[in-house]
Image (spheres, grey):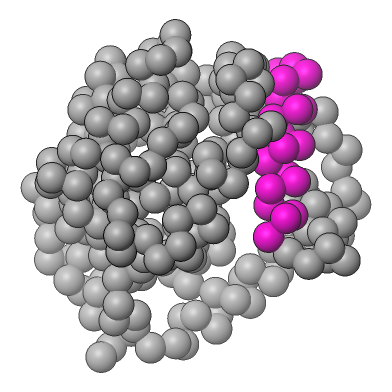
């Protein structure tokens, strides 16, 4: 099948009425690896906000079980995309998320900001490192998808327009990305988690490479030391080379969402329900 058959399918759909199907095709067939990586970085980004990192530091989730927290978040979001937020599994996943969020006093603006990262960070990542950028159809579908998810989470005042929500996200970062010790603490736990996925000898290189991929505002908010510029340039080049290779690969035929590899729930979704997941962070949508 043509490498661009999915793109033609997406172009025939309506980004408002068909946003769930467009999201499923984009995240599960076209860009599963890129969505995974961009959402990892999106969550990392939210820890630059002291009220978010401070809550995580107080709960101790990152100190005790960072891998489980990461897997819970990733799998619950995958359930929503794969099955739809109003499907039986989607509603069950949302109940888990809402139950965990309900345990804490979280500001609506913090919830709104985290929701925004799930829309706009993948768009930016794919514009830089994807084998193709997301089309306007895909961008609008992501906006409508997560806006609907936000409504079901009880998040108030979600902007009605794509550009309006992006402007909120950018303004929030300019105001709230400031250094705090909790930022550094949670940021380091996250960095250590990313490094743990690689052999011991590679971990110092991975750590420097990840920090090099952060924008200056994030580096300052975490209190990290930025590596030499060439480290980031090399990492970005590697991602662009990968994109050229992926562009020439056959179209994916098997959906890759909830069946993506995770370390906490081997074989998921076989033998699991969304309600089996828990201890999701109170700051992740």
Give the vertical position of 160 relative to 214 (above or below): above
> In the image, residue 213 lies at what x, y percent?
71, 51
Q: Nearer the viewer, residue 89 or 246?
A: 89
Give the vertical position of 260 relative to 188 (above or below): below
Q: Nearer the viewer, residue 215 or 49?
A: 49
Q: Quadrant of the C terminus?
A: top left
Q: Nearer the viewer, residue 147 or 192?
A: 192
Residue 221 image-quadrant placement: top right
Residue 105 image-quadrant placement: top left
Q: Residue at x 59, y 29 (%)?
A: 61
Q: Residue at x 35, y 16 (%)?
A: 102
Give the vertical position of 27 relative to 283 (above or below): below
> In the image, residue 209 lies at what x, y percent?
78, 56
Residue 11 part of the magenta segment = no
Decide if residue 284 is on the left or right side of residue 37: left
Q: Residue at x 55, y 80 (%)?
A: 244
Q: Residue at x 19, y 65 (%)?
A: 11
Q: Is residue 162 visible?
A: yes
> In the image, residue 100 lies at what x, y percent?
39, 24
Give the vertical position of 198 relative to 157 (above or below): below
Q: Is residue 229 visible?
A: no
Residue 196 part of the magenta segment = yes
Q: Nearer the viewer, residue 271 or 94?
A: 271
The segment highlighted magenta reads: 177-197
Decide if residue 140 is on the left or right side of residue 268: left
């Amino acid at each position: 099948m043509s490498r661009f058959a999915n793109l033609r399918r997406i172009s025939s759909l309506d980004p408002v009425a068909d946003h769930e199907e467009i999201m499923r095709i984009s995240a599960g067939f076209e860009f599963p690896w890129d969505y995974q990586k961009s959402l990892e970085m999106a969550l990392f980004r939210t820890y630059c906000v002291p009220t978010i990192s401070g809550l995580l530091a107080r709960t101790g989730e990152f100190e005790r079980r960072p891998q489980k927290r990461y897997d819970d978040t990733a799998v619950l979001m995958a359930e929503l995309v794969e099955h739809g937020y109003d499907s039986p599994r989607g509603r069950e996943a949302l109940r888990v998320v809402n139950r965990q969020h309900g345990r804490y006093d979280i500001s609506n603006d913090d919830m709104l900001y985290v929701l925004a990262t799930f829309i706009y960070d993948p768009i930016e990542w794919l514009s830089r490192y994807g084998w193709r950028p997301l089309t306007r159809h895909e961008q609008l579908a992501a906006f409508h998808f997560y806006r609907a998810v936000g409504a079901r989470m009880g998040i108030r005042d979600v902007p009605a327009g794509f550009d309006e929500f992006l402007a909120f996200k950018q303004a929030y970062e300019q105001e709230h990305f400031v250094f705090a010790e909790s930022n550094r603490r949670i940021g380091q736990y996250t960095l250590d988690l990313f490094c743990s996925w690689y052999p011991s000898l590679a971990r110092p290189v991975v750590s420097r490479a990840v920090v090099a991929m952060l924008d200056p505002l994030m580096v300052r908010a975490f209190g990290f030391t930025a590596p030499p510029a060439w480290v980031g340039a090399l990492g970005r080049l590697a991602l662009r080379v990968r994109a050229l290779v992926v562009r020439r690969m056959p179209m994916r035929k098997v959906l890759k969402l909830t069946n993506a590899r995770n370390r906490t729930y081997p074989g998921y979704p076989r033998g699991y329900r969304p309600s089996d997941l828990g201890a999701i962070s109170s700051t992740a949508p």
